[in-house]
Image (cartoon, rainbow, N blue to C red):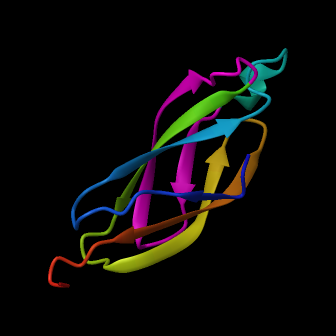
Amino acid sequence: IDRRAVVDPVAPGESAELLLPMNGLLGPNAAADMVDGVVSSSPDFTTELVGMERHIDGKRVNLRIRVTPNPEVRGAYMAPVQIVSPSSAMTFHIIGSVKDPDAS
């Protein structure tokens, strides 16, 4: 996986989704590598595994992840997120921003 993912800017209270391509989820050990969830270690946002779909190249799987910033967050945020499977956990960073409705 890429070690960083950038999500689109959102207004306060909104969520954004991203597709994160992953290798290794289609082979003979796919059951052991199936992703159970994504866990944010930050109080600034939560993450949710919305689904998995085959990548256009047919060799990888895209994880569809929803990122929901805390309603009080404004400006940029970044924190590690863990992708959890029965056999392992991998870390990557999410980078995003929340628009300030009072900024002109």
Which quarter of the picture shows residue 85? top right
Verify whether residue 46 appears in magenta.
yes
Tell me the quarter of the image containing the C terminus: bottom left
Q: Position of residue 67 (x, y in %)?
A: 41, 54
In percent of width and height, residue 47 lies at 45, 53
Extent of the magenta region? 35-59
Residue 104 is left or right of residue 47, and the answer is left
The extreme bottom residue here reads 103
For this rendering, which residue is in front, 97 or 104? 104
Residue at the image point whose x is 36% and y is 80% from the top = 75
Q: Which of 30 and 73 is in front in this view?
A: 73
Q: Is 87 situated above or below 52?
A: below
**Above or below — where is 14 with respect to 17?**
below
Among the 4 quarters of the image, the one containing residue 13:
bottom left
Q: Which residue is drawn at 28% across and 73% down?
A: 99
Q: Residue at x 41, y 73 (%)?
A: 44
- As drawn, which residue projects farthest toward the right? 28
Could you say where residue 5 lies in the image, as x and y percent from the top left? 59, 56
Q: In this view, does 3 lie to the left or right of 104?
A: right
Q: Taking 81 as reference, is 33 above or below it?
A: above
x then y, percent, for residue 41? 55, 67
Q: In this view, does 20 lie to the left or right of 25?
A: left
Number of residue marks = 0
- The residue drawn where x is 14% and y is 83% is 102
Vertically, is 43 above or below 47?
Answer: below
| Residue 23 belongs to the span the image colors magenta | no
